[in-house]
Image: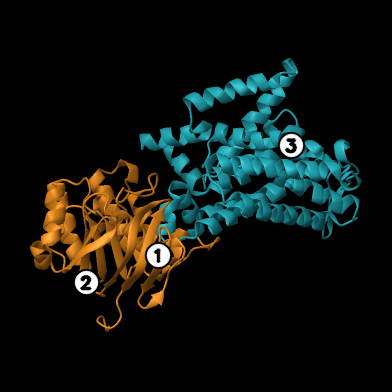
Amino acid sequence: MRDLFALVKRHRVAAVLLFLLVFPLLMPYHALAINILLFGLFAVGFNLLFGYTGLLSFGHAAFLGVGSYLTGIALVHGGWPWWLAMVAGVAAAGVAGLVIGFLAIRTRGIYFSMVTLALGQIVYYAFYKAERWTGGENGLRGIQVPEIHLGPWVLDFINPVTKYYVILAFVAVALWFVSRILASPFGAVIEAVRENDRRAAACGYDVARTKLLVFVLSALICGLAGALRALHLSIVPIDSLHYLLSGQAVMMCLLGGMGTFFGPFVGAAVFLTLEDVATVFTKHWMAIVGAVFMVFVLFFPSGMWGTLVKRLERVR
Amino acid sequence: MSSVATPIIEVEGVSMRFGKFVALNNVSTKFEAGRLSAIIGPNGAGKSTFFNVVSGAFPPSSGRLKFQGRDITGLAQHEFARIGIAKSFQITNVFKQLSAHENVRVAAQMRASRYQLLTPRAKMKTLTDRAHELLARVGLAHLADRTAADLAHGQQRALEVAMALAAEPVLLLMDEPTAGMSPEETKVMMDLIVELAAERSVILVEHKMKLVMGICERLLVLHHGEFLAEGTPDEIRANADVRRVYLGQG
């Protein structure tokens, strides 16, 4: 068991992918599996900033939403090919990350959280008001990507299983990217900044620049999740920018284990599955998810995956 | 090196005010390269403020700071480290949840890589080795994998020094390096400081005068934000003003 655990830790990207490959077979229906994939990626991007750098943003829905909207706008209004539209969505999320990050990293602690929340709301209202481009309250409709052309192959993007694996391909690349960042020298710097930013500065690291770079990387990952979500849903609901989603990213990270590689995915899976099951019984599903969340925050502050990791490491 | 010609660091008319409180009042002095010097003075004399200004924690309210003849007033904290000024803190200030080895490794990494995103750091073996070397040097080789927060106070102080050294400083600033240490640990630290001073310029900020008398070549006495006296340990010992300040304070 411990050897298996060590193996999983060493090849973390491969382990996640292996799991995600068989994952749709385990789920009751594919829409939920795709949702977990997308929100798992969103939470991974958020975790880069929250878990690894120690910056609690309450505005990350902005990057998911901007990624979705710009992908959608490029498809619907621009008539761009799907892949170019995705590039536009991800790039726009990166630019949004640069602007919001630039303003937010000047503050610390609760002020940082409040600034990101406020800026996230500004983005929400900007898209809400730009009805001509975004469809306002009704969301952006008319996104149609029925087929994905890959050279000679044509993939049926309406078939949920195919769709799942196409999205998984993108998630795989993103996870590999995040894993490489965490294992890189820069990954060491961001953890140093989280542990003690004064000391990191005294060690010769430009703390502001480091934080800004992580902020942008995090926004890019969340933007990719958003871009994929636009293709998946065929619509961009205005809720994509709502601060409730920002809050969900925080909950998923805490539930699974902030600052761990698998944690956000575990958190997203548990959160969405709970939501899915609970809504069958009651429309107040948040009460159930909330109760589970509180149990974890109170008794297992390292989250599900984080607690497991700690237990296994203690045994060693 | 023409150590006599250019001082390692030069302080010119530096003042530091916090609101109406004047912590440093127009102080000027020079530190020669390659020396072991100490700033001493009673509590509240402005030692820590002086240390913070010289180490780049904050810019002085007025006055200038020169490092090897170059004006460095107003440079950011991380730039001080990059030009070769490293410090160890008075209150232990390490990366608590990282291992002792990683603490030193990340400090050493500053010279090699800061924004590299895709190379695995495990492959940067020189840094790993250098961190082990430095840990051995401060007597922590056997605790390399221990989380910094789990180290004893004295060991964390030693870790501080290893991290400061990892930045390959030309000038090492140490704020009360033996604060809270046992007499045995103090002895080990003092020996280490003398050893380090043989290779680079070192400035200590110390509250306990006796401790530095034996090892420093030059002492500066700070009192009420001004330099009261400076000279060799013997000169300081004989100085009537210094005796009055220290005896008066008990």
* Residues beneath discs 1 and 3 located on the same chain: no
User: Crowding near pointer 2: few (<14 within 10 Å), some, many (20+)?
Assistant: many
Location of the N terminus of chain B by quadrant is bottom left
- Could you tell me how far apart the alpha carbons at marks 3 and 2 are, in whole angstroms? 61 Å
What x and y, as percent, mark residue A135?
89, 42
**Residue A277's quadrant in the figure?**
top right
For disc 1, the marked residue is B81
- Residue at 81% x, 58% y is A84
- Residue B35 image label: 2
- Residue at 91% x, 44% y is A142
Front: mark 3 or 2: 2
- Residue at 52% x, 32% y is A303
- In depth, the one of A86 and B95 nearer the eye is B95
In the rendered structure, which amino acid carries the disc numbered 2? Answer: Arg
* Residues beneath discs 1 and 2 located on the same chain: yes
What x and y, as percent, mark residue A43?
63, 41
Q: Is residue A126 above or below residue B11?
A: above
- In depth, the one of B191 and B36 nearer the eye is B36
In the rendered structure, which amino acid carries the disc numbered 1? Answer: Ala
Would residue B147 be visible to someone looking at this image? no
Chain with colour cyan in the figure: A
- In depth, the one of A311 and B167 nearer the eye is B167
**Residue B235's quadrant in the figure?**
bottom left
**Residue B194's quadrant in the figure?**
bottom left
Colour that chain B carries in the picture: orange
